[in-house]
Amino acid sequence: MNSSTSSSKNAEWKVVAIFVTAFLLFEIVARILAPTLDYDRVHIHALPGIVEEMSNDKRPRIVLLGNSLLMHGADGELLEEEISRAISGPCSITMITPVGTAIRDWNYLYDTYFTEKNTHPDVVVVGFVAHHIPDQCELKMRRLARHFCSLGNLWDCLQQEGPTFDDRAVGALSHFSALYGDQAEHHWGASSFTVPEFGRGTRKINNILDGEARRKARKKGEPNSSPAPPPRTYQKLAHLIETFRKHGVKACFVPMPQPESWEFDPAATEVIVDNGATLIDGRAIAGMKQADFLDGYHLGETGTKRFTHFLAKALAKELSAGTALSP
Amino acid sequence: MAFNSYLFWLFFAVVIGLYRLLPHRGQNRMLLVASYIFYGAWDARFLLLIAISTLVDFLVAQRITDAPNRTLARRWCALSITVNLGILGVFKYFDFFTTSFASFLESFFNYQTDPVTLNVILPVGISFYTFQTLSYTIDVYRGHTSPATNLLDFALYVAFFPQLVAGPIERSHRLLPQIVNPRKSREGAFSKGLYLIITGLFAKIVIADNMAFICNGIFAAPVGEAGGVDRLVGIYAFAFQIYGDFYGYSSIARGIALWMGIDLMANFRMPYFARSPGDFWQRWHISLSSWLRDYLYIPLGGNRGGRWLTYRNLMITMLLGGLWHGAGWTFVLWGLYQGLLLCIYRPFESRIRQSDPSLLRRLVETFLFFNLICLGWLFFRAESITQVWFFLQEILFTDFNATFLTTYGLGSILLLTGPFLLLEVWLSRRGDLLALTRVAWGWRAAAYVYALFMLLIYQPHRSSEFIYFQF
């Protein structure tokens, strides 16, 4: 090997070293930014603290588990007040509602954050609509692996939720790297800053492409074009109920109100009831109107009050009937 | 197992690890097995086609050399052409021609038929390796190359995984000796390979995938959802999508091949800086355009038969070049359009290319020709001729109102492709495609850190498959 080859190799190793160092620096910056990327990340990063605070609470503990539907739909303070009044005793309400999550996330989230014996609440109330509870619900692999999995359940998660090698690789990288795990948020943030009309443009094109995919599916006669919904299974729902049962947690499942009435799959009802959980049907609450919704999906101020009142009443009835609350 | 998948990079890590440990013969055997695994990962049944093509051409080439006279040699060569084009015809064009013929009968003679269709899946990269093996037997027949004596070496020439599914379409006189002879360590191979891989990934993930999102959205937008200016932006987005996509693939292929001691040809040379069609085809998909020149245009007579025969030959070559890209009328139209451009520019071609105009004139000529190329991309990208017509109407009769989609599309093009084009301007001025590998390491490191940042942050959530796999 002559000296020029050797010096060229050395120079290239310097380039590689800078490359790797830059990656590590980006990772550090990503970790610093992670807890403040958006309000959802603020909530997710606060979860260990929320759970710890709840576990130190001596009052009977109720956890509301769900997503933005429950976050907008239930007023924690009002709920606590109304339940305490109804059962003539204190209770604490803890809201765990990361945006856009569903049954596949909730299984791992509960397994990850509720690890110690004293962290299990007395009651968990899960709020959802139809597409949140089947095994086929939408999944964001990066966020699931990064935020809702622990090292202990990561392998299970990759095996069960990653259909391809690449999904699993993305999941594994996301678990260990904030750059990967929060990539979508970084992309959105950086692009919104550098590309004019990025948000509107992206939303518009996503809508067009989704519409196109539906049109093509209809043309081909694929399942989502036919009137019958695609086959749905509920093994993950059963698994979540089993986890609650194993830890002595009373589980209540609440189909949430929507502006239009929606059909609840009888197979899901069967899974909930057969596994010993309680179904509190919140789809049709007396007096709930279109105007009670903020944006055609989430509840607004008036809707939140109505739903909270309904939930407090239903939970109080359940709690008075059973022995769930044991301080 | 595409180059932008994690599975591929795991596969490549294993391959390069084994490659370093093995002697030359072992390397070739291992690379052949790896190439078959790579190809079989799409569909193991496709391996049979590659095996047939390999075996036929290996045996035919030997028969051509052993043939006692040219007539017999020509027959053997014709057999190879028939088998290779037969495979291509059955898998790629049969359904297209039968359905088109049935439509023709119905439209012109009101005669309804139920066309026979095979409905077979198009094997990935069939057009690439078919052309590569065809060039081998033709070159052996012409005496430009000696026939391979070892079947495994020849099989590796046909199936070498970095360039198997989307080129570059290598010639036997370039690639075969590199396979047959023990590989020498090349100076700067690691540096050049790294450069090619990083720029390739950048072009694919940062440019092509982001442009694909915009282009797919605008091409799918129903009437009223996008204006004429938006449609134009959609075509520009496609121009950079297809460039990023195909340049990216070729660049990564060259990079990883270089790390295994094999130097593949450059397939692109700043194509959007071309000022004329002749210039463009010496910069775009160079391995295909030179293939068409050597095995189609020149045998047809090239420019030796006078002006009109030259025009005819250009039109035939580009028409078949269009059809090579896909079995569809939009590709035929694209090929005809490219042929027409070559014919129209022909009287001025040499003047344009030999002149050394002012910067302004150069910019004007480049911009004008870029837009003509973009018009061609409309034919290439459209799903039907009806869509071509619809887009042309929308663009020509637009009210020239820029919507937020226009701003978003142009902003993205500028942000994501701008720095890459600036690099190309610099490379062009240096007259060296690999100039970045020859500057001080600090500059290179800075460029790679920028690429890394963009790769990590600007990766779109919807990634797209390499376009040229379908050809």
Image: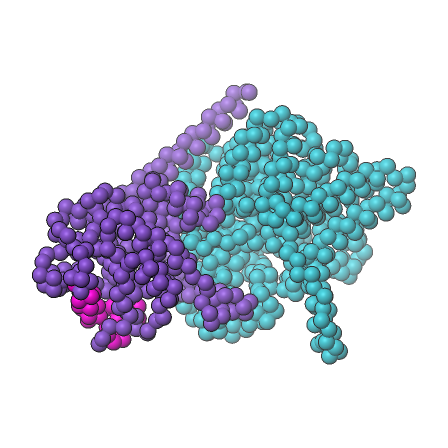
Chain colours: A purple, B cyan
Question: Could you tell me what secondary structure mostly forms the magenta stretch?
Answer: helix
* Residue at the spot 41% in from the left edge and 68% down from the top edge: B403
Residue A47 in view: no
**Residue furthest bottom in the image:** B110
x and y percent of residue B62 in the render?
A: 81, 38
Instruction: Decide whether residue A305 is among the magenta residues.
Output: yes
In this rendering, position of residue A5 left or right of residue B169: left
Give above or below for B310 relative to A301.
above
x and y percent of residue B242 in the render?
A: 55, 54
Q: Nearer the viewer, residue B288 or A45?
A: A45
Instruction: Decide whether residue A312 is among the magenta residues.
Output: yes
Give above or below for A320 relative to B26.
below
* Residue at the spot 73% in from the left edge and 42% down from the top edge: B54
In this rendering, position of residue B32 left or right of residue B61: left
In this rendering, position of residue A196 left or right of residue A75: right
Image quadrant for the C terminus of chain B? bottom right
State which quadrant residue B310 falls in: bottom right
Residue B183 in view: yes
x and y percent of residue B27 in the render?
A: 62, 30
Q: Which range of residues does the magenta coloring cover?
A: A288-316
State which quadrant residue B95 falls in: bottom right
